Image (cartoon, rainbow, N blue to C red):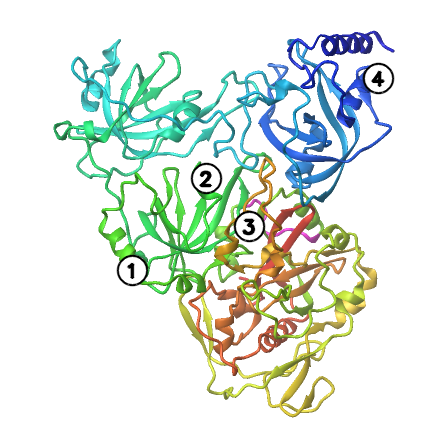
Amino acid sequence: MSDEGGRARSYLLNLEEKQIGLPGGLLRKAGAQEPKSWIQKVLEQIVGSPGLRLTPSEVVPVTVLAVQRYLLECDHRNELPKSPNYCYDVTITDGVYQEKCYLDTSLNSLVRQNILKVGIKMRISRVSCLYNEEGLGQGILCIDSVHCGEVLDDISVEIPFRNREQQKKPERPLRSQRGHYLALWNNEDPYGDIWLTNKQPEDYDFKHLKVISLSNLEMTWSRRNYFPALLVRILYKSKLRYYGKPHKKETEPYQSFLEIADRSGTVTAIMWNDLCPQWYKSLRTGLVLLLQAYSVKKSHPYRMQPPPVNPNIKIISSMEINLNIQDPPTNIIIIPEYQVKPEWGLPKLNHRFITRQELEDKPRNYICDVIGILSFVGRVQRSKKRENHEDFWSYRWIHITDGTSEQPFIVELFSTSQPEIFENIYPMAYFMCTQLRVVRNNNVVPRLLYLTTTDESRVFLAGQRGQPYPYESKVKNFIRWVKTKTDSEKLKNAVIGGYYPYPPVPSTFSKYSRSSKVDSLVTSMNEVKKVVEDLQYREQKRIAIRGIITAIKYIPHSYTNKSTSALVTPPSISQPSASQAAPGQSHSEEINGNQHEGDSLGMSQSFQTTSTTLSPSKKKRILQAPCGKLIAVPQREASSQTNGDTLDTVGMVPCQRSANADTTGNIRFIKDRWESQLLKEKRPCLKDHLKYSYVHPESIPRKFILEHKKFLTQQYNSQPAKYIPLEGRPPKLQEFKSARSLGHFEVTILGLNHEIAIDVAFLPMFCPEDVQTSQVDTLLTCMNYSCVYPPATPVNAQSLSPRALAGDIIKAAAELDRVHIIGILDICNLGNNKVEVCLQKIYSPKKIP
């Protein structure tokens, strides 16, 4: 045994024998019978192993209870990393003890891909021990090699920590003496027990208080050594900004901007560092504050202040107020509203509520507030702030309906540092959002019109006490309207989650080129696989590829048929294609090519469809644009000719016997796929065939069921940092009825060099309501106008079959045989080796300048 290992073992045994409460002491009592613990056994073995590393002879599965992220401090101050170096602490349990372990940075990708996550069974095959040589505590157990298993159904969290230091509050990272834990998937959300919420208004005696106005302070601050108190109201509050760097010394490197005002003007106040955990969650817009012992500095030249609530209030942009925990220690007091005197002249909040009807006339970049009922809540997604960095924005798409228009507000809702609301919104909830910016472009097809959040945006669930908006006229009008709606009416159009392709891709490639922010407009087929592998959990990226559509296959939507009618409606179409992977099949199996070619493009199945009673010459195809506006597209004469092989799918024509169609009475049987001769010739010579066409259950938008609100909300949120015990036996996501009836398509695109092919999914955003009166003119038209959950109407027995629509789409794709196209792909990493690549748009040569 080495001298280092001997000293460490002696030190550990000495602590265990004394049991005097030193750091690292065990939670068991001296002399008590210790349960058999794999964690304890490994720790005893590792202190005597060479190099403090160990490959356990017995590998016992442990359960992951927490995965927590933090910024690793820089050990060498002269070597500054190019980007923040985040690391992870993983809390495990063997059923006897809990232990917080440090995850070796070589395994970080397992967390970033959401493979190593809470609630799974995990086998640790190699460990090491790391000591803090500047402290007196025990060594840290490090995880160096793991195998991640399946998610467990039932996990006990009532298990003690082996090391009493790890249960202390507030929680601190293992390898940081002054750090704290960050939210797992972004840096904006406050996370952990350092964030206080108990600051309350205090009665204050104003007799001997000396107050200065903001306008007077602006004129005299540079000549003052002492600043009198400020009596102000909060007009706006920004989301948190984390600016931590490995070489910075700040304990809590946060800042938040407050726009504060008195009767003489409005100015920016910046809350810094440790003051943010103490005060951020307690402060809200509308509160009156007394600020003492602050500092004043020249304002940042590039800081854009939000518009004033009152145009008569002066904007003071030459200075900024700095609030710190020290230098000097700022004193903040919340003044009760009943103590606020009219003679102070503090401005009132002035909301800019608009209705959905009024949105049509608002200009680009207009700032507004909205209130309504949530009709659609999309899944949480992430996008990188900068390439080659680990910082992400978290966002989701939502629809808000206010009764003034048939169309909803479409809102791109970024995290506003309010995770308690952002992660718990659901359809049917009354929702308000402030400081939204209008995004519009009337010069593209389809017309672009939606709202996006700003740094000052705040979200509320309408009905919360203490909010300053109930007396606004538009809020009262909304409340009157919503009282006229029954719960069943609200529930009928409620949709949650799923793949949501928004904003839509421009109609021409030149417009797409101008709107694209990437360095390379087109990604080569050789690079697609690397792009997919580099994506992190819930990250979504849009790329363009060049190729030839060589195959397309229709996959009807299917879901579990439960006896409970509240969850699902029995499917009325035939069984899905054999190429659909079983729910338990992993995406990695598809990538490795274990899915047989015969399953993907083998003999086609026959299916039934009722013949239409509408005359093709009179029929119009009604499609819905992403902005929600109905567009009538003239009927095109059906063509039975293609540019290549004979099309397998017959068009909407009177039933007749042929090699491709069989009839029995009024029933017509047709095929649901097409494959070009080119693919048949080139398949044996392909260098690679990438398979990313499997559509996972969480990519299907579901009809919302209020009784299962908690389960559905969790399914479409990001993975939590700590395990949340389940309540009872939860249902499966597949048991909930889809909000889309058309199913999806597997599309094969062959690279121009005929070396690589890629299978992608195409998900037309059709609802049952569209099937009643709609057909698809061409594949290009279908992609130009994707519907956005229109109001529901009953579907009668004469409705067109989804398979009939599918036949038109397959026919349109086949007409592009041997034609070079540019395809726009949406790539999303759903975590745990689940990746989807969805075809969002096709540019044919007619569309390419």
For label 1, the crowd category at 10 Å Cα-Cα, with few meaning under 14, some 14 to 19 and many 20 or more, is some
Determine the main secondary structure of the stretch shown in magenta. Answer: loop
Which corner quadrant of the image does residue 760 belong to? bottom right
Where is mark 1, residue-wise? 481
Q: Which residues are magenta?
A: 518-525
**Vertically, is 215 above or below 117?**
above
CA gap, disc 4 and disc 1: 72 Å
Q: Quarter of the image containing the N terminus? A: top right
Where is mark 3, residue-wise? 711
Of badges 4 and 3, the one in the foreground is 3
For label 3, the crowd category at 10 Å Cα-Cα, with few meaning under 14, some 14 to 19 and many 20 or more, is some
Which corner quadrant of the image does residue 752 belong to? bottom right
CA gap, disc 3 and disc 1: 29 Å
Residues under numbered marks 2 and 3 in contact, where contact means CB atoms less than 8 Å apart: no
From the viewer's side, name the closer residue of 84 and 372. 372
Residues under numbered marks 4 and 2 in contact, where contact means CB atoms less than 8 Å apart: no
**x then y, percent, for residue 332:** 31, 20
Task: Provide the secondary structure element on which disc 1 rests.
Answer: helix
Where is mark 4, residue-wise? 49
Query: Identity of the amino acid at label 2?
Result: Glu
Residues under numbered marks 3 and 1 in contact, where contact means CB atoms less than 8 Å apart: no
Q: Earlier in the sequence, mark 4 or mark 2?
A: 4
Residues under numbered marks 1 and 2 in contact, where contact means CB atoms less than 8 Å apart: no
**x then y, percent, for residue 358:** 28, 57
Where is mark 2, residue-wise? 420
For label 2, the crowd category at 10 Å Cα-Cα, with few meaning under 14, some 14 to 19 and many 20 or more, is few
CA gap, disc 1 and disc 2: 27 Å
Of badges 4 and 1, the one in the foreground is 1
Query: Identity of the amino acid at label 1?
Result: Trp
Q: Relative to 4, is 669 on the left or the right? A: left
